[in-house]
Image (cartoon, rainbow, N blue to C red):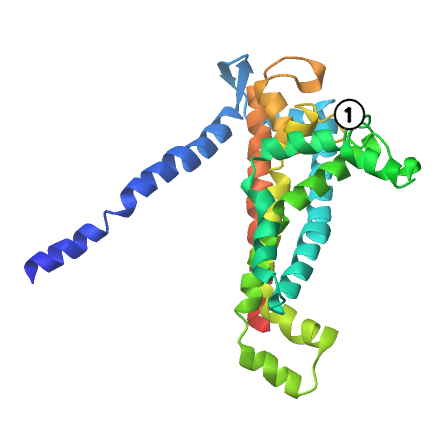
Amino acid sequence: MQTKSKGNWLIHLFPIPALIVYVLFVIYPIFSAFTYSLYDWNGIAKGEFIGLENFVTLFQVEPFNEMFWNAFSHNVIYFIVEMIVQNGFAFILAYILYQKIRGGEFLKIAYFLPRLLSVIIVGFLWKLILNPNFGALNVFLTKLGMEEWAQPWLGDPDTALISIILVNSWFGMGFAVLIFLAGLQSIPEEVVEAARMDGASGLRLLWKIILPMCMPAITIMTVLTFIQAFEAFELVYAMQGSKGEPFYSTDTMAVYFYRLAFGGSGGTDTVAIGLGSALAVVLFFIVASMSAVSLYFMRKKEVQQ
């Protein structure tokens, strides 16, 4: 009995390795970034303590403030378009699969396959597809007699950002389909059958029964999409480089952070670790606070329903 009690006590030590890894690779970098943002930097050499001056520079001194708000607006567009295109279409596809159509298992695999590719590979492939001279998309449009639709998708500031967001929506749609499908399949069949016996069907059944009971999955995807949109970096970097070309029209806060922290901000190669750290801290608080607020209100809505 005494040996068993001693063994139970040892179980509480098992999380310690995971806790150490979490502190080293999550907590410590956040704390370091906040500390670095309070100092002046000469290259990679830490200078004197300057308090919140890096934050003031980031928000009030040109061109840093213009670049910050430019990148921030792109992150907001990123989130809105992904919510409409990626999550909207993903829910429709998941609802079709929920009807247990023939070939549903194959479609699940087909939708998820792009997710298995590296983001860098996806960016490189779509850069070739969207090439204005020999890209498959423009060639396809020309073959259909729609030459006026063919254009330099990634070279035009008006279409570059939306092109990247649509590529990212295609890349992430399979994961969203699986999350929504899991949410739909968790709805008790008795509830759906009872609603049908009461006369609910079609859009009424979807709006009054299916969507409210699928709110946990919608909450998860909304928060994940917000985090992913405000941390958008790999695909933008792979398709448009570290300056968010053309003319910073695809710049995001993560790409702007990369330029500040590792050189190239404002067309120079100057490393600004203090400003980069300040931007990282601001980005952390935006993602953390908005995710917490979204979770609070959507969970509250779930409870009310």
Q: Residue at 71% of width from left, 15% of height from top?
A: 267
- Is 192 on the left or on the right of 266, as rendered? left
- Residue 228: image quadrant is top right
Image position, residue 146 (x, y; %): 91, 40
The count of marks equals: 1
- Is 296 on the left or on the right of 87, as rendered? left
Q: Which residue is mark 1?
A: 246
Q: Amino acid at mark 1?
A: Pro
- Residue 60: image quadrant is top right
Q: Secondary structure at mark 1?
A: loop
Query: Farthest bottom residue?
Result: 198
Q: Residue at 61% of width from left, 60% of height from top?
A: 218
Image position, residue 173 (x, y; %): 63, 50
Disc 1 crowd, CA 10 A, few/some/many (<14, 14-19, 20+): some
Image position, residue 37 (x, y; %): 54, 26
- Is 7 on the left or on the right of 80, as rendered? left
- Residue 192: image quadrant is bottom right
Instruction: Relative to 165, say whether 40 is above or below.
Output: above
Q: Residue at 58% of width from left, 25% of height from top?
A: 276
- Is 192 on the left or on the right of 142, as rendered? left
Instruction: Relative to 225, say whether 25 is above or below.
Output: above
Which corner quadrant holds the N terminus?
A: bottom left
Of the pair 286 and 24, the residue shown nearer to us: 24
Which corner quadrant holds the C terminus?
A: bottom right
Image position, residue 38 (x, y; %): 52, 25
Instruction: Relative to 186, say whether 14 is above or below.
Output: above
